[in-house]
Structure formats: C-alpha cells, structure tokens
Amino acid sequence: MKTFCGRANPTTGAMEWLEEDENYDYHQEIARSRYADMLHDKDRNVKYYQGIRAAVSRVKERGEKAIVLDIGTGTGLLSMMAASAGADFCYAIEVFKPMANAAVKIVEKNGFCDKIKVINKHSTEVTVGPDGDMQCRANILVTELFDTELIGEGALPTYEHAHKYLVQEGCEAVPHRATVYVQLVESKRMWSWNKLFPVHVEAEDGEKIIVSPSEMENCPGVPSVCDIQLNQMPSSDFTILSDVVTMFSVDFSKPVRSASTYYRVQLEPVKSGKAQIVLSWWDIDMDPSGMINCTMAPYWVKSTSAFQWRDHWMQCVYFLPNEEPVLQGEKVYLTACRDEYSVWYKLQKARGEEENKANVRVESPVCRCQAHLLWNRPRFGELNDQNRTRQYIESLMKVLKTDSVCLCISDGSLLPVLAHYLGAKQVQYFFLCFFFFKFFKANHLEDKIKIIEARPELLTSSHLEDKKISVLVGEPFFTTSLLPWHNLYFWYARTAVTSHLTNNVTVLPQSASLHMMIVEFQDLWRIRSPCGTCEGFDVQTMDDMIKNSLNFRESKEAEPHPLWEYPCKSLSDPQEVLTFDFRKTVPQHCLSTEGSVNLSRKGKSHGAVLWMEYHLAADISVSTGPIQISNEKGNCEWNPHCKQAVYFFSSVIESETLSDLPSAVTYAINFNTKTGEIAMDFQL
Ligand code: SAH
C-alpha cells in the first residue's frame, strides 16, 4: 500500500508530497537502528550471557523449571542464550513487528523452535494462563530495555507491569540491578550548549555587547537528554568539582515503581568552582553478587572503558538550571528528580535538611525563554563560538555601508544584530520567532530591526517599505537542515527574493562549496557492518534485513553524524567537489561532477565524509568540516558544532601497505537543483 506524506523539502523549501510505501517508516527504523551496534557490543553480550547462565543455574539448583520472560527480544539473542544455558522455556516478547518476524526466523535457524516462543506484542498486552500467551508466570526476567539515560525507553513502567502480572515473586532478574552515577563539573564548553554568552562587537562607535533576555538566564531548558560520547571530551574541557557518587539504583528482581520521585545526595566539592553540569552514566550488575558488571563509566573513571566502544549507550550531560558557585569542602545537596522516562537535576546549598526537602519540586523542566526550543545544543555552541562570530563580523564590516539596506535569511540568527551594530541603516529579518522579538527587545533593537513574517517567495515591496535590498546575508543556518547541504535553502530563498535586490547586491556568503574526503573510522564503521554470528548464534537474518532496508530506496544515502564524537583518520586529502554561486540564482540544470581522489595513507576505506564551506567574503571562509588534520597519522579534528554527512561504502577495501592501496577512489556526485537532492556514487 502507498500513502502520501507531505513535507517541506529541507533544501528547496518547496512543499512536496511523497508517495511512501507503507513500510517506509519500518525500513527507516531498521536501517538507522542500533541493533547492529548492540550485536557488536561484545562486552554487553558476554556479560548478559554470563548473567543468564548464572540465573538459570540458581533456579535449577532450587529444583525448579527455568521459565524465562525476555521482554524486547529483538533478534531473540538473549532468549537463545537462555535456552543454550538450559532454560526449559522462553517467552520472547517483541513489540516491533519486523523485529518479531526476524526473531522467529533467527530462532528457527538456530534450532530453538521448541524452546522459544516469540510473541509480537507489547509486554503490557501479554496474557498469562492456560489460554494465554504464556502458560504460567516466568521465574527468570531478562531484558535489555535501556537507553543512555537508563529509563528513557520505558524500562520502569515495563518492569512495574511485568512484576505485577508476568513473573513470579522472588524471580531472578538479568540484569539484577542498575546504578546511576553522577559527577559535578564546571565546563565552559558544555555550558555553552545551554546558555548564550554575551557577544562583544567592536563597532565604529565603541564596543557593543549583545545580551540575552533575562528569561533566558534562569530558564531550566528542555527535558530531552543530552547524550554524548563523553570519552571524546578531553579532560582539559572540564573541571571536576566532586567525586563520583551513586545517585540511585534499581533492583530489577523486586517490584519496581515507575511513579515520579526524587533522590538526593550530599556532595562535598573537591574543588571550588562554578557548578554547571552534572555528568551521569550507569552500570548494570548482571548477578546479585555484582561480579558481572557492565559499565558506561568514562575514561577518567575507568581507564579501560574506551576499549569497549558502543553507540547505543553513551553518557549524559545534564545542565543545572543556573550556574552555582561552590566552595571546596562546603557541602551541597544534589537532587535527581525523575518521572517515568527522564531525569533532571538541581543543586542546593546545604541549609537545614527540612528546608531543603520542602524546596524539592518534581516538575520536569520546561523552557520558558523559547530559546531552547529554537536552538538545539550544538546550535547554542555554534552561536557561542567567538572565532566564528569574529569571521562574520569581519566579513560584514567589509560589505556593509552606512546606507546599506540589509536582509537576513537564517533561522534564529544573531546576524541582524551584528549587521545593525556594524552600520547597516536598516536591517530586515526573516522568519520571526517570538523569542527573537524578546531578544531584540533585550538589546533595545525592536524598532531598529524589522522582523518579516513571510516566506521568501511571498515577500512584497511593502514588507520592505519599497526599498531594494543592497546586502543579503545568511549564515546560512536553518533548523530544518539535517544534512550539510540542506542549508543551500539559502540559495533558493535568495532566488525567490531576486526581484527585491539591487542590481549590484552583495550576497554574504557569496558562495559555498561541497568538500569530500575518504576516511577510516576508529569505531563508527560498526554501526553499518554485518554481524554474522553473535556469541555463537547465527544472526545473519538481521544483517540481511538491515541491508534490505538500506537498499529500500535503491539509492544509498549519506547520513548525518557529529564526527567530533567519532574519531577517524583521513586516507585522502580533502577535495572540493561542487561549488554553489549565491551571487547568481539557482540554475535550472543539475550540477554534477566526476573525478577521483588519491588515497595517500594506508587503512580501511570505510566511507566518504562530506561537508560544506561557506565563503563569506573574498578571503574569509567558515567550514563545517575538519578544523585540523594531523599530517603524520591523518587524525581529524572536526567542527564541534556541526554534523557532517557520512556515506558508508558497501564494501571496505583494506590496504596494509601503500603499494597495495587502490590508488584512487572515483566518484560521481550530482546535485539536482529541482529536488535539492545530492546523489552520489563511489567506486573503489
Ligand atoms: N534483547 C535484544 C534487543 C534489545 S533492543 C538484545 O539484547 O540484543 C530492545 C527491544 O525491545 C526493541 O526491539 C524494542 O522494540 C523492544 N521493546 C521495548 N519495550 C518493549 C515492551 N515493553 N514490550 C515488547 N517489546 C519491547
């Protein structure tokens, strides 16, 4: 069956209707899922297997039959482990239909049909009894329902229900227990993902400071978790203010309560500083003794942690509502509040215990200033990047004159304010958001900068008070962009407003270019690489399913990844592949290119990385790609605020020596100006 889905094209801005196969979402979910990453997580798999064997043995030692309930079976892996460990019967529950189908096939292929029953239901729909899904309650409860925040995938309500209706009292649980740890830190880098720092502008009539509205200062932000590969955060980017402490733990073998609650610990700062961030991670004990432990602790807590790379579980960064000065040795209280699915933190000075208790409020944070709804965390980081701002200031100074009439097309941008201070007579600004009005107001600019609430193609001369635009600017940045080239929307908007521009209009950036480089990933390749067998079980069906989903749209697509979190080394020099001239309108014809890049280092060619560079003025460019590539090893350092596009090659070429290197990778890249899509093909 086909259905029509409407969407605004992120590059062209056009509203379009796509005919989607009804399975489209399934395929997207499978193709981009973390199943492969979980199956590659050796540490996790080995420890689950150990924990499951131990639980089956304990039940058998009591002379009972081992009846397993595996909630969220996925490929059926944990049930197959249990059956191999001697379990008498397993009920494998999986809500996601394509996965449940795959589990049936995998269980059959591995010869466990008579021991494992796959049930395609949400666990809360499962029935127990002679005519039910399960004949009787289970005495072993196995699950892997955790996300980086532990509870974000609904583990708590699922456990609560399972203990009430699906398992026996005193059952064995694998994992047996989860513990959440926290550490208080000061970090300008991480804090810059949550607050807008004052921006200093050296204007002709003295220094101007752009400030944020007071609502922003005290805003608690948004409740969505900030999960990152903390192992990629150098220790020079934060200061530790407290020891690692246990915030709370959950015993999965006993009834679990999912209702909102809070936990509180006393901390004694090991250093004076500004408490801004709570770093958090968890571990799971697979058995009651705690001998089989699987931890997400970062490198400075457990030096071996970097050995087990995983992307399905990372670490959390929580922003305190306000930064709070703390003194070494002067106790403070840290409170973790949680609802069924998320956690948030607050810090209080140690006053009377009763007074503090009375102050605990458990509502989840809601952004009051609207900035956190408009800007995501990397965008905050980008706006706070002083080097980047300086480049825009320098470029604006080159192009603005006192009589410039300036139009800015970008989402949630500070460019109109910069342009105003740097001398533009009149700044018009597209794409209003209520916050921006507040923002202009906080800077007393509400009558200096005009906000136009119109899409570019609907711009009229009356919006512009019959003036022509002499300077058109954009970062460009649009919140709808996922892949780097989606910001080419600026070019389409520029084309749509052409009739309002003066003949000798200055466009900033004047052009953009798409760049490409072949890389070897340290770890990221795992998320797209087949698993074959996992702990001795044949899971190839899963590999085939992922491959099928990746091929669903026939053309393989590039995917966005923030590469500062995923180390890689360059195997080729970066190469400019396409340019886009914003001084001209979008052409009717496609822009295509063919060529080859030489491989200059030995290694595995996992894929190509692509990014955009914006040429603001004659000799000023900003790059969303690498900021440094070490010559010797080819290790790359990436722009920390942007996602780059990664195109994984379907086969990996490995070369041990330079002489057996395929000398080059050939490519064909086509930018379809009608659809705004970039198609690419690589030959190794
Ligand atoms: N157990 C597998 C897969 C874990 S991923 C392994 O360890 O490799 C978690 C899976 O649980 C997902 O496939 C998700 O669809 C499923 N799931 C999550 N909550 C569920 C619930 N309450 N009932 C049934 N399935 C659930």
Image (spheres, rainbow, N blue to C red):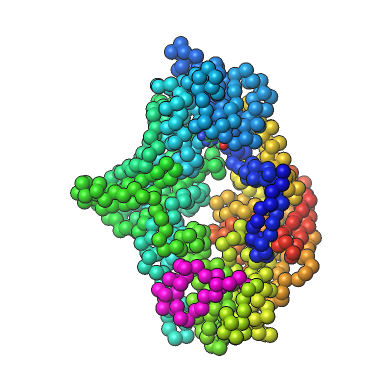
Please tell me in which quadrant of the rendered image residue 196 appears: bottom left
Please tell me in which quadrant of the rendered image residue 641 appears: bottom right
Q: Quarter of the image containing the N terminus?
A: top right
Name above or below for residue 40 compared with residue 578: above
User: Which residue sits at x=41%, y=69%?
Assistant: 212
Q: 572 or 677: which is nearer to us?
A: 677
Residue 42 in picture, x, y percent from top left: 57, 34
Q: 616 or 661: which is nearer to us?
A: 616
Chain part drawn in magenta: 430-456
Q: Can you tell me which quadrant of the image ligand 1 is in?
A: top right
Q: Give left or right: position of 593 versus 602.
A: right
Task: Name, please, the residue furthest toward the top.
Answer: 63
Residue 67 visible in the snapshot: no
Q: 370 or 302: which is nearer to us?
A: 370
Residue 124 visible in the snapshot: yes
User: Which residue sits at x=46%, y=11%?
Assistant: 63
Q: Give left or right: position of 260 versus 15.
A: left
Query: Does residue 439 belong to the magenta stretch?
Result: yes
Residue 474 in picture, x, y percent from top left: 59, 72
User: Which residue sits at x=66%, y=34%?
Assistant: 542
Task: Name, please, the residue furthest toward the bottom.
Answer: 403
Residue 440 in picture, x, y percent from top left: 45, 74
User: Which residue sits at x=46%, y=67%?
Assistant: 435
Name above or below for residue 131 compared with residue 385: above
Query: Does residue 241 belong to the magenta stretch?
Result: no
Name above or below for residue 246 compared with residue 486: above
